[in-house]
Image: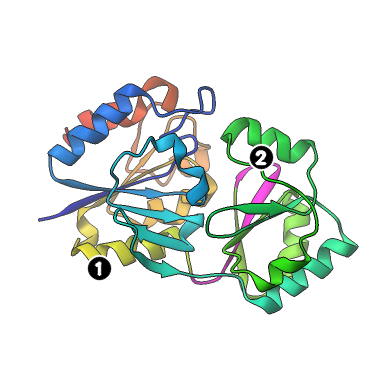
Amino acid sequence: MKKAVFFDIDGTLVSFQTHQVSAMTFETLRKLKENGYLLFIATGRGKDGLKCLEDFPFDGYITLNGQYCYTGTGEVIYENFIRKEELAVLLDYLKEHPFPCGFTMENTKVFNYRDQRVDDVHAITQNDDHPAGDVSNVINEKIYQAMAFINEAEEKELMKELKNCTSARWYPTFTDISPIGGTKVKGIDQFCAYYGVELQDTYAFGDGGNDREMLEHVHTSIVMGSADDSIKGIADYVTDDVDHEGITKACIRLGMI
């Protein structure tokens, strides 16, 4: 009987304070693998944002909130990108309502422009130092996700125009915009089918709004202590925060290691 564990990165595996995965967490991941668990990343980051994992041998990666999923050996098992028509709408919208927006490709991203909002998020993630400039050509690229640096009210207005996209927010100053279809849940189902894992044998660790559907979908959901109460409310188990070894404590408490 195979069991699978899905991990968010920011605020779950990686501390916002140190920008690293702790040595104890890496040791816990090794013990989980020794105990036969399949381990997966489930993140809003792209491939270029995974250096913090220090080449730990995960069995698969759900990246860009489910838009690009690949195995530990590099086999792509699912991809989903924003339609050209939707990109055209977004580019036109940015001309009328300018805000910083990052367009994420397979291995990198580009911003139309940067301001303090972008720099503040990069200070947290250490993953958004990409260049800014002319983005008109993104319409000819596979864009898996866009990072819109807007508040919730502005997000509601924008999403009225993007009929085939959805949004997910894990930080107050920006939201991830993704094409309808690919989600962390979609990635979980893809990997369960690929590896022959039953949903009743799945676990997920998360802390943010973009983890909600994933946490509701798996059999056992573990939420970090730093999460909002609305996310804690859907948890099967609430553990400590990332800076106090919440993953390790939960795995011990649940008898996983």
Residue 27 position (above or below residue 74): above
- Give the camera-side residue of 153 and 116: 116
Q: In terms of secondary structure, where does tag 2 sit?
A: loop
Q: How is the image coloured?
A: rainbow
> Which label was assigned to residue 193?
1
Left or right of 131? Residue 240 is: left
Left or right of 83? Residue 156 is: right
Of callouts 2 and 1, the N-terminal one: 2
Is residue 176 part of the magenta span, yes or no? yes
Name which quarter of the figure residue 13 lies in.
Answer: top left
Q: CA distance from mark 2 to mark 1?
A: 36 Å
Q: Which residue is mark 2?
A: 129
Left or right of 109? Residue 208 is: left
> Which label was assigned to residue 34?
none
Could you tell me residue 98's position as x and y percent? 86, 56
Could you tell me residue 251's position as x and y percent? 24, 33
- Give the camera-side residue of 219 and 233: 219
Mark 2 closeness class: few <14, some 14–19, many ≥20 residues within 10 Å: some
- Nearer mark to the viewer, of 2 and 1: 2
The stretch of residues the image draws in magenta is 170-181
